[in-house]
Image (tube, rainbow, N blue to C red):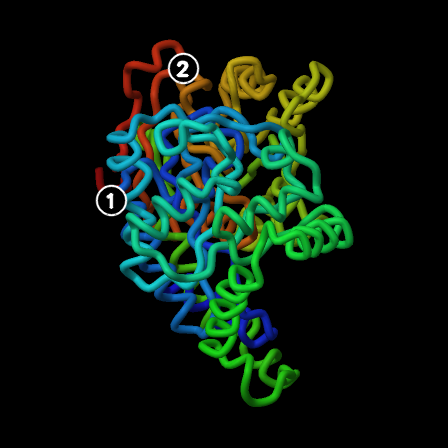
Amino acid sequence: RTAGLISGTELAALGIRQNFAPVADVNVNPANPIINVRSFGADPRAVGRMVAAQVTGYQRAGVVACAKHFPGHGDTGEDSHTGLPVITHTREEWERIDAPPFRAAIAAGVDSIMTAHLQVPALDPSNEPATLSPAILQGVLRGELGFDGVIVTDALNMRGVRTKYGDDRVPVLALKAGVDQLLFPPNIDVAYKGVLAAVHSGEITEARLDESVLRILRLKDKVGLLSGSPYVSPREVDRVVGARRHRIAAARIAERTTTLLVNEDAALPLRRRQRKLLVVGASPAFPTDSTRTTVPELARAFDELGCSTTHLATGRAPDAAKIDEAVAAARGRDAVVVTTDNVDAASAQRTLVSRLLATGVPVVHLAVRNPYDIAHLGDVPASLVSYCWTEVELRAAARVITGRSQPRGSLPVPVQRADDPARVLFPAGHGLSYDD
């Protein structure tokens, strides 16, 4: 709720009054290539509580929240940006797994809900993508769940909604299915002419369009866009965006969510004498600033805490020469912090970690995105998850590793064994502290 309120307050100061968040998908598939850490977790009820809280935070700030991606994108192994996923849940499974967060969002008064470009045969046997499905949008979302707010499509430039129809027909079919807002048609002119032709031919009535226009106008009125000045205040932007109180709250949230998975023989926190560090590994660019990358920024965070740090970005697919360079750089260091990013069975990141472990230098593993990485890495003595790789999360991880803060996070998903997915390596809720 606090994170939503902060984000919403800063968005409103900038004049942005609709935010396509939060994600209401329940990530029950570790191989999900598109939702993953965008989800709040694998427990439908816990996800529902988080979604409702964030909806409340955004909308208290005067920003339209949007629960996505209906009817649920959490159990897919395919990316709807590049294909058309199929959710094979039965109707009972959908009610138990996918529906609760959307019901919670609606109960919390969410203003808009975004559709998913995927097929759910249990909800629509015709196998239309949900974005184009009257059965799913009008039958389930409006009829069964009682949602009367604004329905918005996921981006219409995505492959998942363009596999069956042309760009002139997709907007028409979405409107006929019950959508109110068409997000990101790949060609605005083509989309507009397609809808206009459908109105002229009688395929779409003006009354149908008026339903959506009225919903959107009501929403604009709710957030104050139909009254008062349409301009933002530069002074208010300077006062609100990046405010010290917001940064302090963000740091507190990040520290409370950093999760310690493994801590053999009390390897963490680092001892006072362990100040010569090497930070090495995957180094994705910041989501908000591509000029800044993970490894050097994490090294800087350690230096600010009194360490003497060198760093080497090896990337997500380090070759033999880069791994050799990392092993050589570890010599003489008191400890190595190695970052990983979405490790799988074929990842060269596994070789990097094993080679670093073989040096005998204490190794601390930090998964900067995916909590499932640890399942592929063998016996690392210390392992943490930050779930994201922006500055606030990296600083929180550095503070936990050096003992300036206690690890307080817990896994929102179970982590299965890589060699036997039927067995759980760490259950949801797992998270160590330095008092354990």
Q: Can you say whether 214 is above or below 228 in the image?
A: above
Separation (CA) of disc 1 from disc 2: 26 Å
The location of residue 15, given as percent across then percent down, is 60, 74
Secondary structure of the residue carrying numbered label 2? loop
Amino acid at circle 2: Ala
Compared with residue 372, is residue 431 higher up or lower down, i.e. above or below?
below
Q: Which residue is mark 2?
A: 418
Relative to 43, is 12 above or below?
below
Three-letter code, disc 1? Arg
Q: Name the residue rendered at 54%, 67% in the picture.
A: 213
Circle on res. 331 = none
Residue drawn where x is 30% and y is 34% of the image: 94
Q: Residue furthest bottom?
A: 228
Q: Which mark is residue 45?
A: 1
Tell which residue pokes out farthest to the left in this image.
436
Residue 252, by quadrant, is bottom left
Question: Is residue 247 visible to the viewer in this orientation of the structure?
Answer: no
